[in-house]
Image (cartoon, helix red, strand yellow):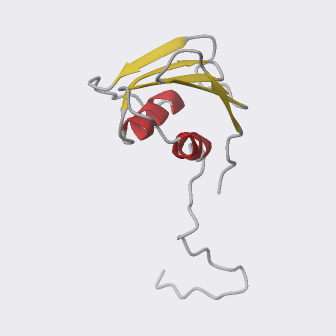
Amino acid sequence: MGQPINVVFTRSSKPGIYRFEVNRCLTGMDHERFRVDDDIIGDTPSDELARRLFSLDGIVGIHLNSNMITVKSDGSELSVEGLIETISDLHLFYNDELEVVNDDEKVESDI
């Protein structure tokens, strides 16, 4: 459930920098920066995205501004496909492994 975010990868002229443009505004007009050693305690979409991206190996910094996302690697090559999938799935609430009950199926309840 939810709608995937459309993600477009743009190469940077600087090594270790990955840029993405999405079809959602994540920060309004604000800039948000995250470093790998930051405690991310908020619950905004950009906070959640930063937590998810940092769960991938090799990321040391993230910068978000409106619909632009810049990811800085630790020098290692990052999987562009993995980054795109992580960003795209931000607003998905259910994954393919969840079994959704059909409206025609009767559910027993003690209530």
- What residue is shown at x 56% (from left), y 43% (from top)? 90
Name the spot of residue 75 as percent of width and height, x first: 37, 26
Q: In which quadrant of the rendered view does residue 104 lie?
A: bottom right
Quadrant, the N terminus = bottom right
In depth, the one of 88 and 91 nearer the eye is: 88
Pick the front one: 41 or 108: 41
**Residue 22 placed where, x, y %?**
68, 31
Q: In which quarter of the image is residue 59?
A: top left
Left or right placement of residue 52 versus residue 24 in this view: left
On the picture, is 107 further left or further right than 33? right
Q: How many labels does the image show?
A: 0
Residue 17 coordinates in the image, percent (x, y): 50, 22
Residue in the foreground of this view, choosing between 42 and 34: 34
Please tell me whether residue 29 is drawn above or below residue 107 in the rendered image: above
User: With respect to residue 105, does 89 lie above or below?
Assistant: above
Q: Position of residue 49 (x, y in %)?
A: 49, 35
Residue at the spot 62% in from the left edge and 43% down from the top edge: 88
Answer with left or right where residue 102 lies relative to residue 36: right
Question: Residue sitting at 59 percent across and 15 percent down?
Answer: 13
Instruction: Return the residue nearer the eye: 54 or 78.
Output: 78
